[in-house]
Image (cartoon, helix red, strand yellow):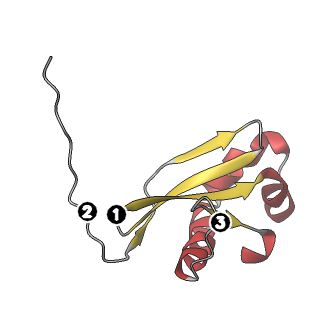
Amino acid sequence: MNLSTCRHNVTNDGKIEFPALQCWNPVTMVATIAAQVGGKRVSCRISSAVLQKKFDVSPDAAMKAVTEHRPLIETAARKLIEKKAFQKDGSILIHYKDL
């Protein structure tokens, strides 16, 4: 069996990018978007409660709100990353006040 390795050119320039990756956890009721920071992946989380309060959506429409308001969510995540407001697990948690 032949194994291959995929390597990406990773820079450590501190640049923050947001690839088109997002997911929903139905158990915790949290949406996550991905950020790429200096070659490392950072999970940026926002709860259903925050999405409901900010965007006036039902719990069933949380991911639709993430998709529709992604630029605003990314801006909030970028500011928190720049402030180094990381959780213990290395993720970013976006609160209502951050939006």
What's the mark number on residue 39? 1
The type of residue carrying mark 1 is: Gly
**Image quadrant in which the C terminus is located:** bottom right
Closer to the camera: disc 1 or disc 3?
3
**26 w.r.t. 69: above or below:** above
- Helix, strand or loop at mark 3: loop
Residue 71 point in image, percent of width and height: 57, 66
Within the image, what quadrant is residue 5 found in? top left
Frontmost of labels 2 and 3 is: 3
Using the rendered view, name the quadrant where residue 78 is placed.
Answer: bottom right
Q: Residue furthest left?
A: 2
Left or right, 96 with reference to 42: right
Q: Which residue is mark 3?
A: 87
The earlier-in-sequence mark between 1 and 2 is 2
| Mark 1 residue element | loop
Mark 2 and mark 3 lie on one chain; the one further toward the N terminus is: 2
Dot 1 and dot 2 residues touching (CB under 8 Å): yes
